[in-house]
Structure formats: structure tokens, C-alpha cells
Image (cartoon, rainbow, N blue to C red):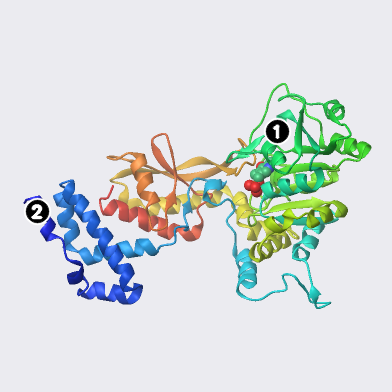
Amino acid sequence: MSTKELFRKLPKVDVLLGDEKIRKLCEEYGRGFVVDCIRQELERMRGLIASEDVVQLEECLKNFPGLVEKKILKEIEYPLKKVCNATGIILHTNLGRAPLGKIHLDAAAQAMCSYSNLEYDLETGKRGKRWTHYADVISKIVGTEGAIAVNNNAASLTLIFGALAKGKEVVVSRGESIEIGGKFRIPEVVEQSGAKLKEVGTTNRTRISDYENAINENTGALLKVHTSNYRVVGFTEEASLEEIAQLGKKYNLPVIMDLGSGVLINLEKYGLAHEPTVQEQVKKGANLVCFSGDKLLGGPQAGIIVGKKEIIQKLEHYPLMRAIRLDKCAIAALTATFREYLDEERAVKNIPVLHMIARPLEELKAQAEALHAGLSECAGMAEILVEESNSMVGGGSLPGEKLPSYAVTIRLKDSSCEELAEKMRHFSTPVIAHIKNDKVWLDMRTVMPEDLVDLIDHIRELFTNNSI
Ligand SMILES: *Cc1c(COP(=O)(O)O)cnc(C)c1O
């Protein structure tokens, strides 16, 4: 068939508009939008003709209205959607860090869908402050006089340095002048706030005398950063937070601890190495401790700053505060998060991040076996196994720490794992897996039991349709 003849086979827009299915689509989604989708699909058909892909073209023309419907559904899909995290990395920065739970949803939904006393004092009938809702519960849990929360922990640092050290020097160890991720670097954040970073010591060794020697009349604050996403081992030395706190007292300088991940409970109980808790940093004498809401804390995106009331008040009144304050949904979800920590058992049950960390190995094994059994009919087409694996906390916490887990691994007979992983990313609920040793690994620690049925269905469909 000549190209000309092929072009003639393409349906006309006005004819299509008379089609029963297309008419229904127009009613539901609006004529303009449907016509737009028709045009885009026709354009794609012209591309197929140009590349002489006649087989594909014939296939598409068999059910053109069906194709248009698919296109419409794709167009109206939310671009930000649920994915199934089968990587075993609990705090996956690219997958939205901490997933929230029902407690967060209920709190946020209430704040979102009705009026609230967000900035209204119900006692006096006058204007209130939005931080009153969370400040008490946070302070109570971490043991400080005050607390304030902002958009994220990067914002915490920007606020702190701006309010306390603008035009002055912030002293930090060279070994802690780090890049946190996404090109976010401590020196640049400090500079952005109008303060100047003064690095002391060397990459591997910094002593308290290095800090002291750097203090002059222009020093604004002493900073310690928890090197949360890497580890320096070997010939190392660092000044402890206690020593720096002492020094701060001696020279009347605020001591700031950037803790990164905000752990409130002892993680050793759950088989992990000790990650310094917020409470410990407060006890060691930091005047301010700041940490993220959506890392190990397991709450919404936020930066939380806790410490002495008089310093927190300075932050509350700094003009930048207005630009980086939390919105009402985040305030509700953050408050709900901290409330759970009033009782550790409840926190581990209701905060998904903690729940995932605490999931017992037998449970993960049983879930892997259930997935494996669900895929038994695909066994002829691939080697599918239940294997021991290593999951991780991630999100720049506990670098190198492994949490033993179980995975279902799939090795294909005829296709590459990259191909399988790619197909899985295109499921209606995309599955994100990782590839190791020429196999696709589905780690069970981050796959929730309620997602299993869907996962089995989608993988089975892939195999039985011969699409892999
Ligand atoms: C993650 C991290 C930050 C940045 O926190 P965000 O909430 O992502 O802005 C800052 N400091 C440290 C040490 C971190 O680990």
C-alpha cells in the first residue's frame, strides 16, 4: 500500500465525533478536550505511516475510539501518583521520603476541609499564633522550653543563621561542612542567610581548641552538624557537642546542632545502630537543635527547631519566618506525629516509617512467600525465588546500616531485567524495584500487605499477556 493510501485510511475527526463511544467521551470530558486527544492520536498515526510501521498502524486503526479513550485517561491522570516502593529503602528521597498514615490523614483532612483556629485564640477571641498548636507537644517530648517548625530543615538553617548570625561568623568543623543532597551545601546555606562560615580544623580531625581559636568579636554562633549521610573512619577526632556547648557558654554564643534526621526513640531496639536522638542533643547542651519532619521522625515535610524560649522567640519574629512557615495541613500532621510519640508503642504502630523499621523478619518472609505463591503460574517463564535481602533506612540516615529483609527475585528467561523493571514502572500503580545480580528484587520491607494483591495481579498479567 502506498503512503498516500495509508493516509487515506486515517479516520476523519467529524466522522469520529459521530461514533457512539466518542460521543460518550465528549459528554463526560468535554468536546474540546476529546477533539484535542483525537488530533494527538492522529498525529501519532501519521508518525507510524512516516516510519512505515504498517503492522502497528493496522493494530491501532482496529479500535481507534478505544485508543482515544486510553489517551484521555492518561491525560487526566494525576502526574503525582502512588507508587509501590519495592526498593527496601524506607526513606527514599525520590519517592517522597516518609509516607504518612491514617493519623496524619485524619488530622490534615480536618484542618484542610473546614475553618480552624489556625491563628485564632479561642480563649480571648483575638488573633492567635499558628505555632501554639504544636509547640507544647514538641517541647514536652524533646525536653526544651520552646519549639518552632518551618517548611523543611534547609529552611530551619536559613532562619537560624539569618536571625542569629547575620553579618557575623558561624564556626563549624571542616569535617562537618557538608553537602546534604540535591546540591544543598552547608556553606552556601550559611552564606544565603547573610552569615559567613568559618571552617576550622581539618576534614578528619577537629579539636575544641580549633573552635576556641576561631572565636573573635565577630563570631555569631557555633555550629555542629550531624554527618548523617556519610561516615569518616580511621584517624579521626571531633569535638563533642558537650565541649562545644561549654565553649558557647564561656563566650556567650548560641550553639546550634543540625541533627538532620529527627530520631526521638532508641533505634537499637529494632536492630539498628544508635542514631543520636533529639533529646540527647538537648541534654548535651545545644541551645538549638534542628531536624527534618519527614526523615526518621516519620511526619510531614517540615524543619523543626527546638531550644531555649528566648532564642525561639527571636526566630518567631524574624521576617523570613513568614515566607517559610508551615501551612495548616502540615501543622495538623506534624502535631499528630508528635502526639504519637507520647507513647512509643503507639508511635511504632501508627507512624509508617517506624512501623516499617520494626516489621519483624518472619512477617517479611511470610509476605515474600505469599507473593511467590501468587506468581506460581509465571514460573515457566522466569526464575522466581524468595531470597534474603538487605533493606535500608535511607534518606541520609544511618549510612551503611542494613536492615535484614526478604525479597522476591525475578530472573527472566528471554528478556533483560532492565526491561522487566521498566514494565513494572508502567503498571497503573508503578512498582519501583532494584536490579542486582541480573535479577529484579522486590524487597518486602517497604511493600505493604495491602499492596500485595495488586502487585501479584499486575505481574501475572504481564507474564500471561506475553508482554515480557
Ligand atoms: C536532610 C538534612 C538536611 C536538610 O533537611 P531537609 O528537610 O531536606 O531540608 C539538613 N541537614 C542535615 C544534616 C540533613 O541530614
Q: Is residue 31 shown left or right of residue 79?
A: left
Question: Which is more toward the observer, 331 or 404?
Answer: 331
Question: Which residue is tagged 2?
Answer: 4
Confirm whether residue 274 shows in the render: no
Q: Amino acid at mark 2?
A: Lys
Q: Residue 69: x and y, percent?
A: 29, 66
Q: Earlier in the sequence, mark 2 or mark 1?
A: 2
Quarter containing ligand 1? top right
- Residue 372 visible, this angle: yes
Which of the two residues, 81 or 2, is positioned nearer the viewer here?
2
Residue 389, given in percent of the width and then of the height, sits at 51, 40
Residue designated by label 1: 177
> Residue 349 has which mark?
none
Residue located at (93% from left, 36% from top): 250
Left or right placement of residue 22 versus residue 285 in this view: left
- Label 2 vs label 1, nearer the camera: 2
Residue at x-position 35% and y-position 72%: 29
Q: Residue at x 78, y 26 (%)?
A: 206
Q: Position of residue 59 (x, y in %)?
A: 17, 56
Name which residue type carries label 1.
Ser
Q: Classify mark 2: residues with Cα within 10 Å, few (<14), some (14-19) or many (20+).
A: few
User: SS of the residue at dot 1?
Assistant: loop
Asked where in the image residue 382 lies, by quadrant, the reply is top left
Vertical relation: 282 (above or below) 400: below
- The residue sitting at 79% across, 52% down in the picture is 306
- The local crowd at label 1, few if under 14, some if 14 to 19, many if 20 or more residues have their Cα within 10 Å, is many
How far across and down, in percent of the image, does residue 373 sit? 39, 53
CA distance for labels 2 and 1: 66 Å
Side of 401 relative to 314 (left or right): left
